[in-house]
Amino acid sequence: NTITVAFRTFAALTTLGTDGGSSVLITGLTGAATPDDPDLPVSAPEGSPLAPTGRWNSTEGSLEVRVDGNTTAGALYTFSFPLLNPPTPQHSPSVSIETLGVAAARVRLGKAPGNAAPLLVAGFLL
């Protein structure tokens, strides 16, 4: 599956800071069969300030994407990344987004409806 995230921030995210700058953290992608990957490919439009890879943690179901360039508050940013569905049926998990390096509250992400929901795996009736 390709998971696509679109977001806006109230404050600019920067590459400056004591911890190396800002990151975008997606959490709640539990059940994915994709193994841990410190360099999971991330696709973003040309000129995006987001890094081309992210740190995927399969146990936590989280992806951290570093900000490689300053963002503009209120601007729309998008990125996509691949995840493998789990081998067993599951409902689509509750997914959230937050920033690291800039104080902001965690926000639950909206989902595509029906069968397009992230990591939804239907079962079979026998």
Image (cartoon, rainbow, N blue to C red):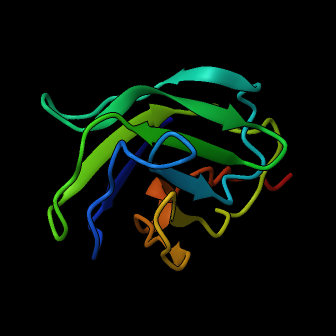
Q: Residue furthest front?
A: 18
Q: Nearer the viewer, residue 61 or 11?
A: 11
Looking at the image, residue 75 sits to the left or right of residue 43; the answer is left
Q: Nearer the viewer, residue 88 or 38?
A: 38
Instruction: Tell whether 46 sits left or right of 102.
Output: left
> 61 and 103: which one is in front?
103
Above or below: residue 101 compared with residue 23? below
Q: In the rendered view, tell whether residue 59 sits above or below residue 116.
A: above
Residue located at (20% from left, 36% from top) = 48
The residue at 33%/34% (across/down) is 68
Horizontal and vertical percent position of residue 65: 48, 40
From the top left corner, tell me how far across and down residue 3 is, in percent.
Answer: 45, 44
Residue 27 located left or right of residue 44:
right
**Nearer the observer, 121 or 2:** 2
Residue 108 percent location from the top left of the image: 53, 76
**Residue 71, position as x, y percentages in the image:** 22, 52
Where 90 falls versus 82 (above or below)? below
State the image quarter where residue 15 is shown.
top left
How many numbered marks appear?
Answer: 0
Residue at the spot x=46%, y=38% of the render?
Answer: 66
Residue 20's place in the image compared with 8, above or below, is above
Residue at position x 83%, y 43% from top? 88
